[in-house]
Image (cartoon, rainbow, N blue to C red):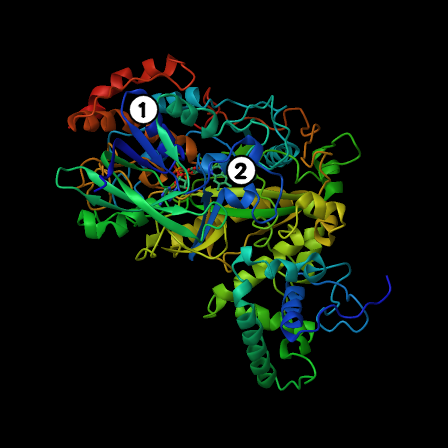
Amino acid sequence: MPPRAPADDNPRTTTLEAFADTIVPGEKRYPDDVAVAGAAEGGGAVQAGAIELLEWNATGVTEGLDDYARMLSDHARDYAAEHGLTLDESLPPFVALSFEHRTALVRRLTAPDHPEKPFWVLLTLFSNMAYDSAAHMSTAEAIAAGHPGLLAMGVARPDEDGLWRFPAHSYGRPLARLHPDTTPSGSPA
Amino acid sequence: MTSTERTDVLVVGSGFGGAIAAYHLAAGGARVVVLERGPWLGTQDFEHDFKLGSSYTRAFDFVVGDGMSVLGGNCVGGGSVVYFAAMPRAPRFIFERHGTIGRRMWPASVTRDTLDPWYDRVAESIPVTTQDWNDVTYAGGLWAAACDHSGRTANPVPVAIDNTKCVNCNWMMAGCRFDAKRSLLTNYLPAALAHGAQIRPLHEVQQIARNDDGSYRVHYDLIDEEDYRIRYDGGAIDAKIVVLAAGAGATPVILQRSEATLGAMPHAVGRYFSGNGERLNTAVLNEDRVREVLGLSRGDGLAYAANQIGKGPTVANWDRLDGSLPEFTRYSLEQLYFPPGLGTILAQVADAAPGESTWFGVKKKEMLRRWQSWLIIFQMIEDANEGVFGPPPAKGNADRVSQQMLGIGRLKYDPVESTLRAWAMADAEVKEILERDGLATVTAWTNDVIGAYTVHPLASCRIGDDPATSALDDRNELRGHPGIFVTDGSAVPGALTVNPAMTIAALAERAIPGIVRAAQERGVDVTYGAPAPDGGISARRGVADLLPSLTRR
Ligand SMILES: Cc1cc2nc3c(=O)[nH]c(=O)nc-3n(C[C@H](O)[C@H](O)[C@H](O)COP(=O)(O)OP(=O)(O)OC[C@H]3O[C@@H](n4cnc5c(N)ncnc54)[C@H](O)[C@@H]3O)c2cc1C
């Protein structure tokens, strides 16, 4: 694939992309991709459509995305100061952090004792869902389109009518002794 | 002047507790209205799709609390539409539990022996049937073989599934597209409709008030069919009898909100919530070891790699369901399936390095790559009824975040030592079984992200003999509020160590004669004695001797 220019270099978008990429990391989309850190092979949450999902108001987080990006920037600046890091000022603060530091900050924000934890957990949930369930797309279409998450997980393709059926489903033989006290209804005694 | 609509019996919620009450009361001759907050979906509406807005999110409810998140149904049929249909009866020792109250939690009148005839009624009505090894999925077979390899037993679980129609698609949580799952849409609810009951979807009950004549006025809002955050002006219905069956995450909230208009609630309303001791473990199988150690092969070159194939849980280990063991150390270990999204985020990697997260990041992505080799094991331990509901939200039982499914509720759950210890014991046992001989790597789901979680909410408005620790008397009537009955999972006194729907349904069946009697006393022309929804009568005979004790006042 030829390297392509950033589709959207809006700081809000790159900040949210960097967050999603921390949850499910992916390879860089083009050589100077700053949002995706390139910590793993294959597409991650960003390639899987995290921004499309977050931007869909069905999630309930869309109206809060400005706040998310702003707060993430504030936390990143504090974090950098605390660790004596100098951030590249041409980038949004969270984007300017390395993958390791992004991870450390997200771990802190989602830790049980953090006052904003529920707020950040919501963003991790949707970042993850973009990758492992493509919640912004019809599942059958996502698989047909080569969705990176569903493909990497090996999700089977549906039948032609878009429904899944697994005629072969059982080893078809007894594999353990039954509990000696099982009642005729098949329940524990 | 418009007058308020009237009915004999108003039922709130159309899950197990609601559907069973609606059927029997309508069949007995009462005018019955059922108000259900969710949509009314049919077979053709059930989609195989994770896209937000598909049946998977329309029919489902996920309420995040403080230390406990509750998953349930949100549609006509309630939890039965989205559930996995494992329907075991609770073991005998469960009814003797003391929990934390220093005396038997269950009313003296309820034991496994006295409940069995009611279980029989449910088994005939739904129907619930046993499974054999040909019905057991690869995942269930693998769990059975691993249990056997470690010297344990394993049982195919009884289910409410017509296995001749089941295609093992594992989309049960989105509703069954093949009419194989015997949800309440296939038995009690159509029978209730046939007897004249009215079911009104997208009606969310907010509050109940008492009228001067002793009847009740039930207030509801109308809910938008696509965006559940949007509500419209509703109305009110007067009823002689109210049956609350909104589920254990919602029934106590309605009662809390109604305190201003009904008067003081029993202390146990909104307390003693149990998550049925649930906890999940994820095993990532080593396919070679599955073949070599357990001798399993699918016949197509694969040993397992079948996480996606099946119908929820099919096999359970019941070796620890032994009444001679101390309370809080008994549990079952059941094979399960949980789809991506909800079923993956909390799974933890076994080998996170310092500085890495156990539940997101590079290694978690690697774990997801092996998703087809996952096996999820479901623990049901005896928790200590730790849950308490805070003051109710403005509407419903949660502040809705997403258009569907996701909301923030008021339940607080702080697991006590005995609960944590039981989970640790069960974790260790699952590890012992599945890590033996290098079969798998096992980790528990993290409780650090959303706290504990349950698909089996129970006990938040429970029956009992002790007014201080139970909200309902032993016939499910709300103490101090004659004519209001609760028949859903909130009536069950505590954790069951097995899947609860069979017990919820049996208790609801058992409550009916008392509700019929109360309705008669309020001038409703109704009798008890309907057959099973399909006309079967064999189980009805079995409960005949129990009726006098259930209809005394
Ligand atoms: C994914 C999943 C899998 C499960 N698998 C199993 C299993 O295999 N075996 C098993 O035994 N159990 C299983 N369960 C649990 C089982 O579904 C529940 O225990 C059972 O449905 C509870 O019955 P209920 O009558 O208490 O309430 P529900 O079935 O939850 O019904 C309550 C109904 O009330 C409605 N409601 C709520 N608030 C209001 C309101 N204010 N106004 C009007 N209506 C309202 C809800 O929308 C819902 O339809 C599963 C649950 C889930 C979520």
Residue A65 falls left or right of residue B40: right
Inspect the image, locate mark 2, and give the three-letter code of the amino acid beneath it. Glu
* Residue B139 location (% of width, % of height): 63, 36
Residue B388 at least partly seen: yes
x, y (%) of residue B512? 28, 26
Q: Which disc, if any, is residue B26?
A: 1
View extreme (right): residue: A2
Visible residue check, residue B461: no
Asked which quadrant contains residue A165, the reply is top right
- Crowd class of label 2 (few under 14; some 14 to 19; many from 20; radius 10 Å): many
**Which of the four quarters of the rendered structure image does ligand 1 lie in?**
top left
**In the image, which is nearer the foreground, mark 2 or mark 1?**
1
Give me the residue at 47% from left, 45% from top.
Answer: B225
Q: How busy is the neighbourhood of tag 1: few (under 14 within 10 Å), some, or many (20 plus)?
A: many
Give the residue drawn at x 67%, y 65%.
A21
Q: Which residue is mark 2?
A: B334
Q: Residue furthest front?
A: B1
Q: Mark 2 falls on what kind of element?
A: strand
Q: Which residue lies at the image location 26% right of the left edge and 16% below the top edge?
A: B545
Question: Which one is in front, A50 or B7?
Answer: B7
